[in-house]
Amino acid sequence: MSKENTDNTESERKKNTSLRLNSKTLKALKIKAIEEETSVQKIVEQLIEDYLDGHIKLKKRK
């Protein structure tokens, strides 16, 4: 096991997942990440954390 994995607690370890996005949405997200000097990973993780903390509510779609 690498040192990186042994230094993290179980709750801090990253797990892989995948999702499907519309190609236009993904392109716009990548551009926004570049403009903000961050990564798609960081944007998605922050949005998910904010949603789970109740700071973001999903719009109901028809």
Image (spheres, helix red, strand yellow):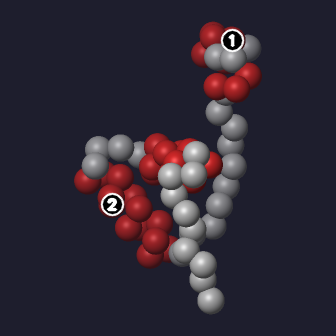
Q: Is label 2 in a helix, a strand or a loop?
A: helix
Placement of 60 over or under 11, stated as above or below: below
Badge 1, how many Cα within 10 Å: few under 14, some, many 20+?
few
Task: Please identify the residue farthest to the bottom as the structure is shown.
Answer: 62
- Residue 8 placement (x, y as % from top left): 64, 16
| View extreme (front): residue | 54
- Who's the residue at 39% across and 58% down the image? 30
Residue 22, horizontal then vertical, whole percent: 54, 75
Mark 2 neighbour density, 10 Å: few (under 14) some (14–19) many (20 or more): some
Mark earlier in primary sequence (2, 1): 1
Count how many numbered circles sit on residues in the image. Answer: 2
Residue at 41%, 62% in the rendered image: 29
The label shown at residue 40 is none
Q: Is residue 44 at least partly visible in the picture?
A: no
Q: Quadrant of the C terminus?
A: bottom right
Label 2 belongs to which residue?
31
Q: Is residue 30 above or below residue 6?
A: below
Query: Quick one: SS at disc 1?
Result: helix
Q: Which residue is mark 1?
A: 6
Q: Nearer the viewer, residue 14 or 57?
A: 57
Residue 28 makes an appearance in the image: yes
Residue at 73% across, 22% down: 10
Mark-to-mark CA distance, 2 and 1:
34 Å
Tell me what residue is drawn at x 67 percent, y 55 percent.
18
Q: Could you say which quadrant of the image residue 57 lies in?
A: bottom right
Residue 59 image offset from top left, x and y in percent:
55, 74
The kind of residue tagged 2 is Ile
Do residues under tags 2 and 1 come within 8 Å of each other at their CB atoms?
A: no
- The quadrant of the image that shows the N terminus is top right
Q: Amino acid at mark 1?
A: Thr
